[in-house]
Image (cartoon, helix red, strand yellow):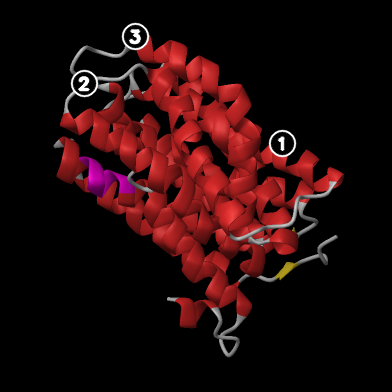
């Protein structure tokens, strides 16, 4: 993988999409893992504790590799990243996953690529062509219609969907800001510094929330929590932010349209949730929209 990472003969957008897919694949098990974790652990402990564990590991990585300290401007960007992907999304999604099936939550996340692309325009200075917006809108409309028509096995929208939408918005902003900053300091450095920045704010609430965990959470709950800490909150972002940096926020963000489909597969395999024929039809439309968006032109501004 390292050789591919350094292979300059491949087009940056191709590499960006490859690493973006690795990130999406890592994130696809996030909702099922969250469902497992909150089955025996307090949702606040799950939502914030993952940042505490990943932040502790990040501090060690940054110290061992002797990374330069971010500038004052970069700290401000890191604060936005931390609020979006370390605090906002994990906490809100953990609360929502106590009340929603992972399959239903997966389709709500289908709005994430479109919102991330919009955030990329606002924060990263990218200008996608009309074909891109058409493809992204098609994919997003597909998953929203899918959720409303019970394609995930649970009909309609729920109050928890509003919370999950808030989580999606937080993630979109954090993704775009992190993708822009990764062009300056590197993908894995962005998430590590953001996690370190968040540790003082999540440590006490996590310890207090631990008192509300079930006496014996079980292996499944701890497995889900471990996955969230090591993969969803840390390693997955290494590939994700690197992909956004070299391939562009708007273009690479469209790989997230595949995430609901991948999440539904994990939900079926791990949580025994139902996958309907409508699920497969929606997934086919989503894949088609990703292919169309891949051909659209996107003008990118220089970092800085």
Give the Cα separation between the discs numbered 2 and 1. 32 Å
Q: Secondary structure at mark 3?
A: helix
In the image, residue 54 lies at what x, y percent?
A: 48, 40
User: Farthest bottom residue?
Assistant: 9
Q: What residue is rendered at 47% in x and 19% in y?
A: 206
Which span of residues is magenta-colored?
Answer: 263-267
Q: What residue is rendered at 55% in x and 85% in y?
A: 7
For marks 2 and 1 on the same chain, the one whose residue lies earlier in the sequence: 1
Residue tagged 3 = 212
Q: Main secondary structure of the magenta part?
A: helix
Classify residue 104 as left or right of residue 61: left
Classify residue 302 as left or right of residue 80: right
Residue tagged 2 = 217
The answer to whether the residues at label 3 and label 1 have Cβ atoms under 8 Å apart is no
Count residues near mark 2 (Cα–Cα under 10 Å), then give few for <14, some for 14-19, many for 20+.
some
In the image, residue 50 lies at what x, y percent?
A: 44, 33
256 in the magenta segment: no
Residue tagged 1 = 79
Q: What residue is rendered at 58% in x and 63% in y?
A: 242
Give the Cα separation between the discs numbered 3 and 1. 29 Å
In the image, residue 94 lies at what x, y percent?
A: 41, 25
For marks 3 and 1 on the same chain, the one whose residue lies earlier in the sequence: 1
The answer to whether the residues at label 2 and label 1 have Cβ atoms under 8 Å apart is no
Occupied quadrant, residue 170: top right
Q: Secondary structure at mark 2?
A: loop
Q: What residue is rendered at 17% in x and 31% in y?
A: 219
């Amino acid at each position: 993988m390292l050789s591919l990472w350094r292979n300059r003969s491949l087009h940056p957008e191709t590499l960006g999409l490859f690493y973006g897919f690795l990130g999406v694949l890592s994130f696809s098990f996030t909702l099922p893992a969250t469902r497992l974790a909150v089955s025996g652990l307090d949702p606040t402990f799950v939502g914030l504790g993952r940042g505490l564990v990943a932040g502790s590991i990040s501090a060690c990585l940054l110290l061992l590799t002797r990374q330069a300290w971010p500038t004052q401007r970069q700290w401000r960007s890191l604060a936005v990243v931390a609020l979006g992907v370390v605090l906002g999304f994990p906490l809100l999604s953990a609360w929502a996953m106590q009340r929603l099936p992972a399959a239903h939550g997966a389709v709500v996340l289908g709005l994430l690529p479109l919102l991330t692309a919009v955030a990329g325009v606002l924060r990263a200075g990218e200008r996608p062509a009309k074909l891109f917006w058409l493809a992204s809108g098609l994919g997003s409309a597909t998953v929203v219609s899918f959720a409303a028509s019970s394609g995930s096995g649970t009909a309609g929208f729920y109050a928890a969907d509003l919370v999950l939408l808030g989580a999606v918005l937080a993630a979109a902003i954090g993704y775009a800001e992190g993708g822009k900053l990764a062009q300056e300091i590197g993908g894995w450095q962005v998430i590590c510094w953001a996690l370190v920045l968040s540790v003082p704010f999540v440590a006490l609430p996590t310890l207090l929330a631990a008192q509300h965990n079930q006496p014996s959470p079980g292996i499944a709950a701890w497995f889900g929590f471990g996955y969230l800490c090591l993969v969803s909150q840390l390693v997955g972002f290494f590939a994700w932010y690197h992909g956004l940096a070299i391939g562009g926020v708007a273009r690479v963000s469209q790989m997230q349209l595949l995430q609901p489909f991948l999440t539904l597969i994990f939900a079926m395999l791990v949580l025994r949730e139902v996958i309907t024929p409508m699920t497969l039809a929606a997934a086919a439309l989503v894949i088609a929209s990703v292919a169309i968006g891949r051909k659209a032109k996107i003008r990118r501004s220089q970092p800085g």
